[in-house]
Image (tube, rainbow, N blue to C red):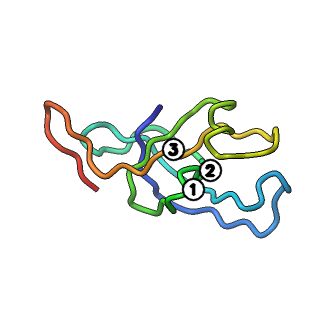
Amino acid sequence: MVIAKVIGNIVSTQKHDDYKGQKLLIVRAVDLNGELYGNEMVVCDGADADAGIGDYVLIIQEGGSARLAARCDHLGPIDRTVVAIIDTIETTEGVLNK
């Protein structure tokens, strides 16, 4: 799993039938200080909590698990899915809030 921050939304009026009803987000991984790193990733919002820009989220990055978490009834490929919106991360180094 990866901690990430939502940095954008994808709006698509035309898409494969397997992805109709799936909200797509653009995220980047964050470290425990909230610093962005790595490339942007496209994820499905499987948390059903309406993650939006600025939210910290927990991403699952494995096809089979990501598809299950997105509650898909198809075998179309899904690489990453949001499984939680994070309110707070607390470590020995401090607290990271939204």
Instruction: Indicate the amino acid at tag 3.
Output: Val
SS class, disc 1: strand
Q: Kindly report which numbered mark, 3 or 2, lies closer to the viewer in this rendering.
A: 3
Q: Is residue 15 left or right of residue 59?
A: right
Q: Which mark is residue 25?
A: 1
Residue at mark 3 to residue at mark 1: CA–CA distance? 13 Å
Q: Nearer the viewer, residue 35 or 14?
A: 14
Q: Marks 2 and 1: in contact by CB < 8 Å?
A: yes
Q: Kindly report which numbered mark, 3 or 1, lies closer to the viewer in this rendering.
A: 3
Q: Is residue 26 left or right of residue 37?
A: right
Task: Please name the residue shown 29% across and 45% down the image.
Answer: 34
- Quadrant of res 69: top right
Residue at mark 1 to residue at mark 2: CA–CA distance? 6 Å
Q: Nearer the viewer, residue 26 or 84?
A: 84
Vertical placement of residue 5 versus 63, above or below: below
Q: Quadrant of the C terminus?
A: bottom left
The mark that comes first in sequence, 1 or 2, is: 1
Give how far across and how far down residue 46 sits, in percent. Answer: 59, 50
SS class, disc 2: strand
Residue on which the image places disc 3: 83
SS class, disc 3: strand
- Quadrant of res 21: bottom right
Q: Is residue 95 left or right of residue 36?
A: left
Instruction: Indicate the amino acid at tag 2.
Output: Cys
Vertical placement of residue 93 versus 25, above or below: above
Give how far across and how far down residue 82 sits, in percent. Answer: 53, 46
Task: Please name the residue shown 42% across and 44% down the image.
Answer: 4
Q: Which mark is residue 44?
A: 2
The mark that comes first in sequence, 3 or 1, is: 1
Task: Please name the residue shown 58% across and 43% down the image.
Answer: 81
